[in-house]
Image: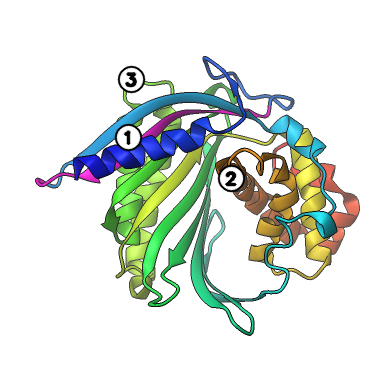
Amino acid sequence: MNWRKSALSLFLVAMLLSLQLIAAPQAMAMGANNSSVTFRRAVVAWYDEKGKLQMNVTWVNETIDFANLTNHSCACSNCNASNVGANVNVSVVTLYNMTKKHEQLLFFGLNFYNGTFNYTMYALVYHAEREQYNFTLVTRIFTDPETGEYRAFVTGMNIAPNDEGRVVPVGDAIITADNLTLPEYYWALGKVLMGLGKHDVTKWIWDKSARELRHLSHLVKLKLPEYNQEKAVGIALTFDFSVGCTGCIALAGFLCTVLAEGVSGYLACTKACTPFCVGFIGAGGIGFIICMGVCGTTCNTLLRVIIGAGTYTACQIGGAYICEKAGLC
């Protein structure tokens, strides 16, 4: 089993280092014009024979500056990334919807199909607004094309402290190498974050994130029992980050354009983030994936504002209004 953990760790580190990024030795305070995030560590986690969580941690310290993403404009008609699914139909079914004043849990089934292709995957979106922070998580559940069994959980999660003094614009990448159910996966991620935060600058943000993951683990176990029986490995990108005011306004513009085209709410963020992140496609692929994870969590926050204010009204007023309401400008 050890060789597997080492191989996964090296693979993840190699992917992160393949990014064409600017190294930064330390995290900086996040401001309206500072839209960078430092991915500090690559972690592989697993349970040993005694059931104790083990971690293999490799320091990476690579920084992504999202301020430049909006310079990589791409006409969707000429953008390969945007046209990947041009000939594929997509149906989205809401399988569970729990919406409270300060908390939302959504679970979707997504079916991609055409005359020769049929593939089903799932997506879970969780958002919590607490007194001290907001927390957003998006998990995509990839399945086996032939059997439909779970194969991988791919998660992006973001915590945004309300107190600027608590902001630490950093991220960690985590692989759970064991086959776990979805509640077990969230519980393990929480334990990893608690371990990473000990005696570290990330202690406050990762402790709060771990609390949300434990809560989410219980919610999935109680509310989605029919979808938490199968097991899979997982990869998660967790960060404390804002795209910044300028990036937010650009993203809001993409999102409004997509919504005007009649794209469904969940798929809207995936489509809006593609041109936003297209500048990282040349960075070995993983840069685009990381950007989509970061972008997706912010986009879901903007989507909530737009839907709450009314899509036509919010988009007519403009991106600055949407981002101000979202607390990003």
Q: Which residue is the extreme one toward the bottom?
A: 115
Q: Which residue is mark 1?
A: 194
Q: Residue at x 74, y 25 (%)?
A: 33
Up-down: is 233 above or below 62? below
Up-down: is 113 above or below 298? below
Q: Residue at x 32, y 34 (%)?
A: 194
Closer to the camera in the image, 67 or 112: 112
The CA distance from mark 1 to mark 2 is 29 Å
Q: Residue at x 73, y 31 (%)?
A: 67
Up-down: is 72 above or below 30? below
Apparent side of residue 61 relative to residue 246 in the rendered image (left or right) = left
Task: Say what amino acid the circle numbered 2 marks.
Answer: Gly
Which mark is first along the chain, 2 or 1? 1
Tell me whether circle 1 and circle 2 mark residues in contact (CB < 8 Å).
Answer: no
Residues drawn in magenta: 35-50
Quarter of the view holding residue 6? top left
Tell me whether circle 2 and circle 3 mark residues in contact (CB < 8 Å).
Answer: no
Image spot of residue 76 (x, y percent): 81, 56
* Secondary structure at numbered mark 3: loop
Closer to the camera in the image, 328 or 193: 193
Q: Residue 285 shows which numbered tag?
A: 2
Q: Is residue 20 magenta?
A: no
* Secondary structure at numbered mark 1: helix
* Mark 3 residue crowding within 10 angstroms, few (<14) / some (14–19) / many (20+): few
Apparent side of residue 270 relative to residue 141 in the rendered image (left or right) = right
Task: Say what amino acid the circle numbered 3 marks.
Answer: His
Image spot of residue 296 (x, y percent): 62, 50
Closer to the camera in the image, 27 or 323: 27
Q: Residue 199 shows which numbered tag?
A: 3
Can you see residue 130? no
Apparent side of residue 45 relative to residue 264 in the rendered image (left or right) = left
Which mark is first along the chain, 1 or 3? 1
